Amino acid sequence: MRDVRDALMVARNTDGKLVRRPLSPHIQVYRWPISMALSILHRASGVALGVGTLLMTWWLVAAATSPAAFDTAQWFIASPLGLLCLFGWTGALMFHFFSGIRHLIWDLGHGFESPAYNNSAWAVVIATVVTTVLIWVVGLAVW
């Protein structure tokens, strides 16, 4: 008995000759271009900023509501999970900021050549990591 997938792999070329269709690249073989990865991450960081803003809104509303509500919010934010959320929110904010600057430069008509958009992509990644770590080093030193 033949597998139906074998039948789907066969096609005819323009001369009518039977040929095997190529397989799609597998995720282990295909490498994402950095600009494509950053485009997807820009959208994901926008979603993460929305979720992080809800966390900060909860903290502010709790501060305005009562000392007990504020203590609960403060306890969560100071917990390891809360600090991890804040760190991720800071990283998303910095990434979205620098990626947005990159998009503004593109809107001005600059940086569309292959080396320029690859270099600007790596600049966004490096700037994100450096500023996120710097913010947290200063924040923990002051805290």
Image (cartoon, rainbow, N blue to C red):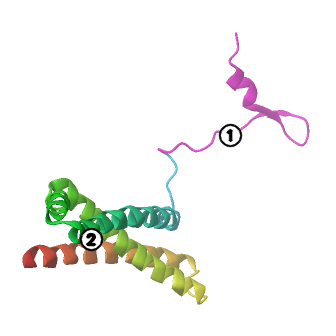
Dot 1 or dot 2, earlier in sequence: 1
Q: Looking at the image, can residue 2 be seen?
A: yes
At label 1, the amino acid type is Pro
Nearest to the eye among marks 1 and 2: give it: 2
Residue drawn where x is 45% and y is 61% of the image: 44
Q: Pick the quarter of the image with the N terminus.
A: top right
| Main secondary structure along the magenta-highlighted residues | loop
In the displayed structure, does residue 33 sit left or right of residue 57?
right
In the displayed structure, does residue 81 sit left or right of residue 1?
left
Q: Which one is in front, 31 or 36? A: 36
Q: Position of residue 6 (x, y in %)?
A: 70, 24
In the displayed structure, does residue 56 sit left or right of residue 41?
left
* Residue stretch rendered in magenta on the structure: 1-28
At label 2, the amino acid type is Leu
Kindly indicate the quadrant of the structure image that contains residue 98: bottom left
In the displayed structure, does residue 63 sit left or right of residue 45?
left
Q: Are marks 1 and 2 in contact (CB under 8 Å)?
A: no
Kindly indicate the quadrant of the structure image that contains residue 79: bottom left
Task: Reply above or below: 28 against 82.
Answer: above
Count the marks: how many? Answer: 2
Residue drawn where x is 24% and y is 65% of the image: 62
Q: Mark 1 = which residue? A: 22
Residue drawn where x is 64% and y is 39% of the image: 23
User: Which label sits on residue 128?
Assistant: none
Q: Which one is in front, 29 or 98? A: 98
Q: Pick the quarter of the image with the C terminus.
A: bottom left
State yes or no: residue 80 in magenta: no
